Image (cartoon, grey):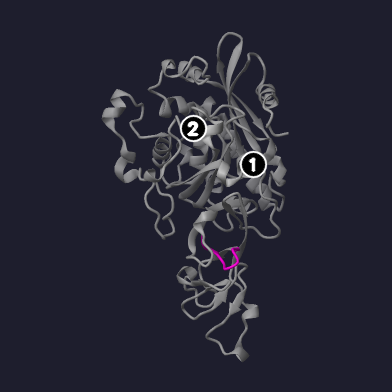
Amino acid sequence: MVTREENEILTRVGPGTPMGELMRRYWIPAAMSSELQADGAPLRLMLLGEKLLAFRDSQGRVGVLDHACPHRCASLYFGRNEEGGLRCIYHGWKFDVDGYCLDMANVPPHQDFKSKIRAKAYKTAERNGVIWVFMGAGEPPELPAIEATLLPAHAVTFNWMQRECNWLQVLEGDLDTSHVDFLHGGARTEKVFAPDDPRRFGAINRSPEYEISETDWGTMYGAFRPADPGETYWRIAHFLFPFWTITPSGPFGKHIYARAWVPMDDTHTMAMRILANAGKVDPGGASQLGITLGADDLLPNTSDWYGRFRPRTNADNDYLQDRDRQRRNSFSGIPGIAAEDQAVTESMGGVVNRMNEHLAPSDRMIAVTRRRLLEAAQAVARGEDPPAASAQIYAGARGGYFIAKAGGSMLDAYRAANAKNETAPA
């Protein structure tokens, strides 16, 4: 159990907060490259409690600025994106992607002081269809070498979805493997799986045991159950600093996956999920289980601060729960894995009161990860470097399920599974 003070540290992400300052030391996936067009409309972004604007200039460069014009604080969202910069419609002041003032249109040339004016701007980068933002001081690290993020945009499926609750409680859902065979599969029996599908062992035994390991990139767990005689069914997953997860929802070595739980503010989270194209590398995996979202699963985007990638399932419609379906053939009655996770994590409230929890052995991964996050935030507050400071540290992380010989440790089973796969990270 965490204390009230620790819960505040873990959940608050605004400027000056310990967790917010930790997250500002990492690159943050903020938007799809396709969301910005050269000289097109700016995009409102809420990141770590800050109201920001993203825009693409005439040369294709991306800028992320504070939305308030440094002149009189009118919102630059209404500005004109033209000729290499964003021009405020209030008085015509214009700013480039680095925040430098290019023009003070309402000031006579001899009174111009644009060289002294700079809008608050953050460093940006683009890679494989994603726009990244670095919100910290000083030079940013290299972009993280998480396997899924290194694949070209045409080789992956992106899913972006907003959650109306704190970032940590949705991230912890990815670290809680035992809920899968209840919330998502409680109505399934062994008979729904093929005889050679390892997932049948989850339906047979819904209470796995666990091994947990601290890693350079964060934390790692292995949930294990007996399989056929002399074998063990493993599900391996990871937390990667500061807000990434790799879950075991596909076969190990073929399931190239990562998800970022990006805090918009303390009570809103943007989930960005990257999955190597399912038809080629994840047969019968994520798509069969209803994870992949289509356009019909999201409301139309709007231009407000919380207007992007909102699920049509929400608290107002009880996440479209069908009680008749729940009685007949669905454990939850809620349509699809994403909506099921959304319902339970949002039902905890905007920021869950962790003092009311009673953690069990199945929550060991959550407990260890919380401790590591607290230690990391406190270390940064002391002026120390954050964990996983090198981009290449992430390269060893891979998750999934597989069958191994009985009796070995998690790390032995993990290394052996990686060695079997020709494309496994070094």
* Residue found 50% across the figure and 75% down from its top: 88
* Picture coordinates of residue 11, whole percent (x, y): 52, 47
* Picture coordinates of residue 385, whole percent (x, y): 71, 49
Does the segment drawn in magenta span residue 41?
no
The residue closer to the viewer here, 375 or 266, is 266
The residue closer to the viewer here, 417 or 154, is 154
Residue highlighted by disc 1: 146
* Residue found 34% across the figure and 26% down from its top: 330
Q: Which residues are magenta?
A: 51-61
* Picture coordinates of residue 99, whole percent (x, y): 60, 70
The mark nearer the N terminus, 1 or 2, is: 1
Does the segment drawn in magenta span residue 59?
yes
In the displayed structure, 55 sits above or below 24; it is below
What is the number of the mark on residue 286? 2
The residue closer to the viewer here, 107 or 72, is 107
Judged from the image, the secondary structure of the residue bearing numbered disc 2 is loop
Tell me the amino acid under the disc marked 2: Ala
In the displayed structure, 419 sits above or below 263; it is above
* Residue found 50% across the figure and 21% down from its top: 199
**Structural crowding at the residue carrying mark 2, measured as other residues with C-alpha within 10 Å and reported as few (<14), some (14–19) or many (≥20):** some
Residue farthest toward the left in the current orientation of the protein: 324
**Structural crowding at the residue carrying mark 1, measured as other residues with C-alpha within 10 Å and reported as few (<14), some (14–19) or many (≥20):** many
Give the alpha-carbon distance from disc 1 to disc 2, as whole Å.
Answer: 19 Å
Q: Nearer the viewer, mark 1 or mark 2?
A: 2
Left or right, 328 with respect to 250, comes to left
**Count of marks placed on residues:** 2
Tell me the amino acid under the disc marked 1: Ile
Left or right, 80 with respect to 398, comes to left
Which quadrant does the C terminus fall into? top right
What is the number of the mark on residue 134? none
Q: Are marks 1 and 2 in contact (CB under 8 Å)?
A: no
Whether residue 48 is visible here, answered yes or no, is: no
